[in-house]
Amino acid sequence: MIVHKVGKQAKLLDLQTHMANTYPSVAFSNHPVTDIHDRIWISDAASGLFIGTSLNGLGCKFCLAEYLDATDTNDVIAEMKTLGVTIS
């Protein structure tokens, strides 16, 4: 699952296409929201990745990328559910 700012659909589609070609057995879902500024990629209920840049910024400059532990990942998932994001 990728959570990102609304309005970056083209860049996200490029990323999803690349990832799907690289990892064909992995399913991706996209949930644009306006209440979360930072980018958070969640692989399952126990792990996630915080990315401190926009999708357009990936690969352009150094940025923070931090693994989330299970507690933090579950907190993010709980908050997303309160925003109406369905998590599969």
Image (tube, rainbow, N blue to C red):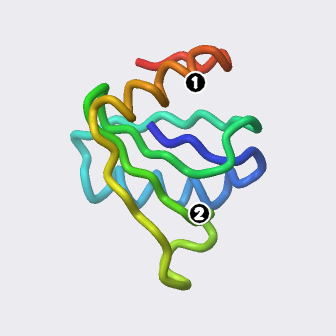
Determine which of the numbered discs, if any, sits on residue 55 in the image.
2
Amino acid type for the residue under numbered disc 1: Met
Callout 1 secondary element: helix
The Cα atoms of the two marked residues, 1 and 2, are separated by 19 Å
Disc 2 crowd rating (10 Å Cα; few below 14, some 14-19, many 20+) is: some
Q: 75 or 6, which lies in front?
A: 75
The quadrant in which the N terminus is found is top left
Residue drawn at x 75%, y 44% is 6
Q: Residue furthest bottom?
A: 61
Residue drawn at x 67%, y 40% is 36
- Name the side, left or right, on which 35 lies relative to 14: right
Q: 57 or 50, which lies in front?
A: 50
Disc 1 crowd rating (10 Å Cα; few below 14, some 14-19, many 20+) is: some
Determine which of the numbered discs, if any, sits on residue 80 in the image.
1
Q: Residue furthest front?
A: 71
Residue drawn at x 68%, y 50% is 9
Q: Image quarter for residue 10?
A: bottom right
Circle nearer the N terminus (1, 2): 2
Callout 2 secondary element: loop
Q: Position of residue 23 (x, y in %)?
A: 25, 51
Position of 53 relative to 27 (above/below) = below
Q: Position of residue 71 (x, y in %)?
A: 32, 29
Q: Image quarter for residue 74?
A: top left
- Name the side, left or right, on which 79 lies relative to 88: right
Q: Position of residue 37 (x, y in %)?
A: 68, 48
Q: Image quarter for residue 8?
A: bottom right
Position of 31 relative to 82 (above/below) = below
Amino acid type for the residue under numbered disc 2: Leu
Q: Position of residue 27 (x, y in %)?
A: 34, 35
Q: 52 or 28, which lies in front?
A: 52
Position of 29 relative to 18 (above/below) = above
